Image: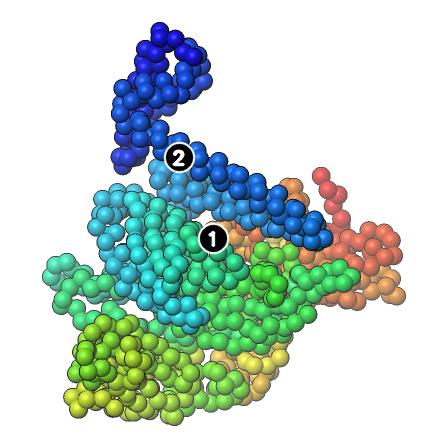
């Protein structure tokens, strides 16, 4: 029992505590200012014990009420929270003990108890990892640029690596100022564009009733890490710039899926955004409109909360997450663009009608030496590989080859290319697994600009993020022409190719608006949307609420197999009833005799609709024509020798040299022996010609036509009599990537005629010879002149390159069997040669005797 003298002390302590808590409470409710540092409280204030013994709870409560009556409410709520916490703890203990009792009572295996515990712990660890990553990203978005660089010195912003990317802190300051207003526009975009598309996609899985309830995008604006302005090879009527966008928001978005309520928090997106300002006009605001889009799929991450996260059963939340990511890509990832009109002087068709640059035909031929991911009875089994090809938002998938690490897919697809610079073809090889997520077997990336520059690319790619594996890919670029005379050549080419899914033309459709649609219901106007279809390809506009004269202003592109017998089918549908309120069919061959093969803003009378129902749209037809094929050797020396052609012939490893040059690279280090002549040989040449072989002629012959002018053969065994190796070494400063291609070896010594070597090549980076830098070619059985054509890549900075050397070792697999050293020859090449970073090094090199490790 406390004495009377202790009560004033308790009141004084309570008053002091209340006075200290009031500033903290107001600071928590107010919006934090990032420019004002948060004062740190001395540790002693938290650790100093009270000077007097604690009084009874009743006396403390009474004293607290006298000082601040509001504390009485706090005390009551805290006591109620304590009761609920106690009940929850008791319930949890009963549930744990009851589950153990149930397991023992039913006589079940202990696995029924261990398996849920393991799954629960694994899920908690995964959540902690993802939450940690999100917190780091959010802290980086809120911190200053200097703090970000000092904290992550190994992942510097883009403007540090690339001199053509400039800093733009002034843009971030402007974004911070205008973000509250941009917040309203973003909410409108999500509500009007993304919500109906997500609802429609979920309806296909019998999940109806999706809608956003509350959308608060938070106070953290997007951050621009760097900006690149294009001032060369750009139309004078447009301005193009790329932004390194990073958005880590503190959003709070609620949605309903039927009767279930869920939410999205910690939404993050990172990628390169292209902004095209066009056309330039002579009145304010000087720019007619904007086109905003991501060049490739950005990195998107967010956290699902609420009932959806609680019911995180296999398939539900993953399906919703995938659909949301797909719909974001359907709005802002190429070929989809977000158009914004800035001036009424500019017609909508100039901003919103798709304008492809051309078509990229992709042939994924085969893969070799993939990793084994399946678990068999006797250990590691094989894999069930398939490949996924991504070009922006366009995705293609090959068939699955079961139980094979050397699959032959022979898969063809065509991608529409809207931007030449900056886009890439991303190919991911996966192992199909029915019981869990598909495992990655490697990935490869090809810049589209390089394919356009060369016309045809036929190459073997070393898979990244994999211990081993090669991928054979062929690509050809097709430009678009408005000459109907090119159609017959395109039709002949597809016939000789013998692939029914290939196209000869591209149809562009711009749906402007409709007028005087008939009413599907007598009581109200229709909710119309339009479906356009060519062959099996179908596109759909947005739905316009309660309007019989809707304005869509949406454009679509369709690949056409044969314009002479294809047609464009149009349906206008009322969303409420699902009934057609208008139809139209337009044969594509009617565009062939038109001027420039196009119709602009023409009205068409709708069928099965009202007598005055019309559809206003624009049509444009373009023929696919192969781009000019340029060999790498022709780019260097101006030669006009025969060119490569993409054919449907059998898969052959054809030598493809990067930056090949016929220049004699003699040096005192004996890269090429002075006494050995350079032999110019035409490789895989069926019909040599001084002019480029036409694509159709190459197809008609049924063989690959590939000609190189390069030092392909060596007539010398080298300075040490150990043979010679043809290597290509190139370093890309922009991509910070070292590429090494092992082409072939000639005249390996045959010490024993009855023991022909099985040579292979190993690569290491010096100093260190770490396992991460190890690369290895395949083994060629019984050969003294092996041909590999294997390409390997290293990610290495420019500063590290100057202090690094490449060690190349030729070994024989039989050396381990018959005893003795398996090493047949070695090379050590310093990588500080400026030629490696400029034109690239391509030369024969003399193999040297074994060099002992340091």
Residue extending farthest left: 283
**Element marked by disc 2:** helix
Q: Nearer the viewer, mark 1 or mark 2?
A: 2
Residue placed farthest to the front in the image? 1
- Placement of 53 over or under 244, stated as above or below: above
- Compute the Cα span from label 1 to label 2: 25 Å
Which residue is at the far top?
A: 5
Visible in this render: residue 422? no
Residue at x 30% of width, y 60% of height: 190
The picture places residue 852, in percent across and down from the top left corner, at 75, 43
Q: Earlier in the sequence, mark 1 or mark 2?
A: 2
In the displayed structure, 249 sits above or below 538; it is above
Seen from the viewer's position, the closer of residues 431 and 123 is: 123
Q: Is residue 660 left or right of residue 19?
A: right
Label 2 Cα neighbours within 10 Å, binned few <14 / some 14-19 / many ≥20: few
Q: Secondary structure at mark 1?
A: helix
Q: Quadrant of residue 341?
A: bottom left
In this image, 144 relative to 655: left or right?
Answer: left
> 94 or 18, which is in the foreground?
94
Pointer 1 residue: 310
Given residues 788 and 29, the one toward you in this image is 29
Q: Residue at x 24, y 69 (%)?
A: 351
Q: Position of residue 91 (x, y in %)?
A: 53, 42
Position of residue 644 measured from the top left corner of the image (x, y, whole percent): 53, 76
Residue tagged by mark 2? 80
Q: Residue at x 41, y 57 (%)?
A: 298
Residue 403 pos. (x, y %): 68, 70
> From the viewer's perspective, is 45 left or right of 854?
left
| Image quarter hosting the N terminus | top left
Confirm or deny contact between disc 1 and disc 2 (CB under 8 A). Answer: no
> In the figure, 43 relative to 541: above or below?
above
């Amino acid at each position: 029992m406390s004495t009377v003298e202790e009560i004033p002390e308790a009141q004084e302590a309570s008053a002091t505590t209340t006075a200290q808590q009031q500033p903290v409470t107001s600071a928590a409710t107010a919006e934090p200012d990032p420019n004002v540092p948060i004062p740190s409280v001395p540790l002693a204030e938290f650790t100093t014990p009270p000077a007097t013994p604690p009084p009874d709870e009743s006396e403390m409560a009474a004293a607290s009420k006298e000082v601040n009556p509001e504390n009485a409410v706090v005390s009551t709520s805290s006591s109620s929270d304590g009761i609920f916490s106690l009940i929850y703890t008791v319930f949890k203990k009963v549930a744990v003990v009851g589950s153990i009792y149930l397991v023992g009572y039913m006589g079940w295996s202990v696995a029924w108890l261990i398996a849920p515990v393991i799954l629960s712990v694994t899920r908690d660890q995964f959540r902690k990892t993802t939450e940690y990553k999100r917190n780091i990203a959010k802290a980086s978005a809120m911190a200053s640029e200097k703090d970000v660089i000092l904290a992550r010195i190994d992942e510097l912003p883009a403007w540090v690596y690339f001199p053509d990317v400039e800093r733009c802190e002034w843009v971030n300051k402007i974004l911070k100022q205008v973000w509250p207003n941009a917040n309203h526009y973003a909410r409108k975009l999500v509500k009007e564009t993304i919500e109906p598309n997500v609802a429609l996609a979920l309806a296909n899985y019998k999940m109806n009733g999706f809608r956003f309830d509350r959308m608060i995008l938070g106070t953290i604006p997007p951050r621009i890490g760097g900006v690149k302005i294009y001032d060369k090879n750009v139309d004078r009527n447009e301005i193009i710039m790329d932004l390194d966008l990073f958005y880590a928001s503190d959003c709070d978005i609620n949605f309903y899926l039927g009767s279930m309520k869920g939410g999205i928090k910690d939404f993050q997106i990172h990628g390169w955004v292209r902004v095209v300002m066009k056309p330039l006009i002579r009145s304010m605001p000087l720019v007619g409109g904007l086109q905003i889009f991501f060049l490739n799929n950005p990195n998107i991450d967010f956290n699902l909360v609420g009932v959806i996260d609680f019911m995180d059963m296999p398939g539900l939340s993953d399906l919703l997450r995938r659909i949301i990511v797909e719909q974001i890509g359907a709005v802002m990832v190429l070929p989809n663009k977000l158009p914004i009109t800035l001036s009424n002087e500019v017609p909508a068709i100039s901003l919103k009608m798709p304008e492809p640059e051309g078509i990229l035909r992709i042939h994924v031929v085969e893969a070799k030496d993939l990793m084994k991911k399946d678990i068999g009875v006797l250990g590691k089994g094989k894999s069930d590989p398939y490949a996924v090809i991504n070009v922006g938002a366009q995705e293609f998938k090959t068939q699955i080859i079961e139980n094979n690490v050397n699959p032959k897919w022979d898969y063809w697809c065509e991608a529409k290319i809207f931007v030449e610079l900056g886009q890439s073809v991303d190919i991911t090889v996966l192992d199909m697994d029915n019981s869990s997520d598909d495992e990655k077997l490697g990935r490869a990336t090809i810049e589209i600009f390089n394919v356009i520059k060369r016309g045809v690319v036929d190459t073997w790619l070393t898979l990244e993020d994999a211990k081993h594996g090669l991928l054979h890919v062929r690509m050809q670029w097709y430009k678009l022409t408005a000459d109907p005379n090119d159609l017959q050549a395109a039709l002949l080419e597809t016939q000789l190719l013998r692939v029914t899914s290939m196209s000869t033309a591209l149809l562009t459709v711009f749906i402007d608006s409709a007028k005087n649609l008939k009413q599907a219901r007598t009581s109200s106007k229709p909710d119309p949307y339009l479906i356009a279809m060519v062959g099996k390809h179908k596109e759909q506009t947005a739905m316009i609420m309660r309007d019989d004269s809707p304005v869509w202003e949406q454009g679509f592109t369709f690949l056409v197999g044969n314009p002479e017998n294809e047609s464009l089918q149009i349906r206008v549908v009322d969303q409420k009833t699902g009934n057609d309120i208008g139809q139209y069919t337009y044969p594509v061959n009617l565009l062939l005799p038109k001027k420039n093969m196009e119709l602009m803003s023409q009205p068409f009378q709708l069928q099965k609709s009202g007598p005055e129902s019309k559809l206003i749209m624009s049509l444009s037809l373009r023929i696919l024509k192969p781009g000019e094929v340029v060999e790498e050797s022709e780019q260097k020396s101006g030669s006009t020798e025969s060119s490569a052609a993409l054919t449907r012939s059998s898969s052959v490893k054809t030598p493809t040299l990067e930056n090949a040059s016929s220049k004699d690279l003699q040096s005192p280090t004996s890269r090429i022996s002075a006494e050995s002549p350079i032999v110019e040989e035409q490789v895989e040449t069926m019909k040599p010609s001084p002019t480029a072989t036409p694509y159709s002629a190459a197809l008609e012959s049924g063989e690959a036509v590939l000609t190189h002018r390069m030092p392909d053969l060596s007539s010398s065994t080298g300075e040490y009599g150990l043979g010679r190796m043809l290597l290509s070494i190139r370093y890309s400063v922009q991509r910070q990537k070292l590429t090494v291609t092992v082409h072939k070896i000639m005249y390996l010594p045959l010490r024993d005629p009855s023991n022909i070597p099985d040579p292979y090549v190993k690569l290491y980076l010096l100093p260190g010879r770490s396992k991460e830098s190890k690369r290895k070619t395949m083994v060629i059985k019984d050969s003294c002149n092996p041909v590999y054509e294997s390409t390997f890549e290293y990610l290495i900075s420019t500063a590290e390159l100057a202090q690094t050397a490449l060690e190349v070792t030729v070994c024989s697999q039989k050396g381990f069997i018959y005893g003795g050293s398996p090493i047949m020859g070695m090379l050590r090449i310093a990588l500080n040669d400026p030629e490696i970073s400029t034109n690239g090094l391509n030369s024969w090199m003399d193999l040297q005797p074994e060099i002992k490790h340091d």
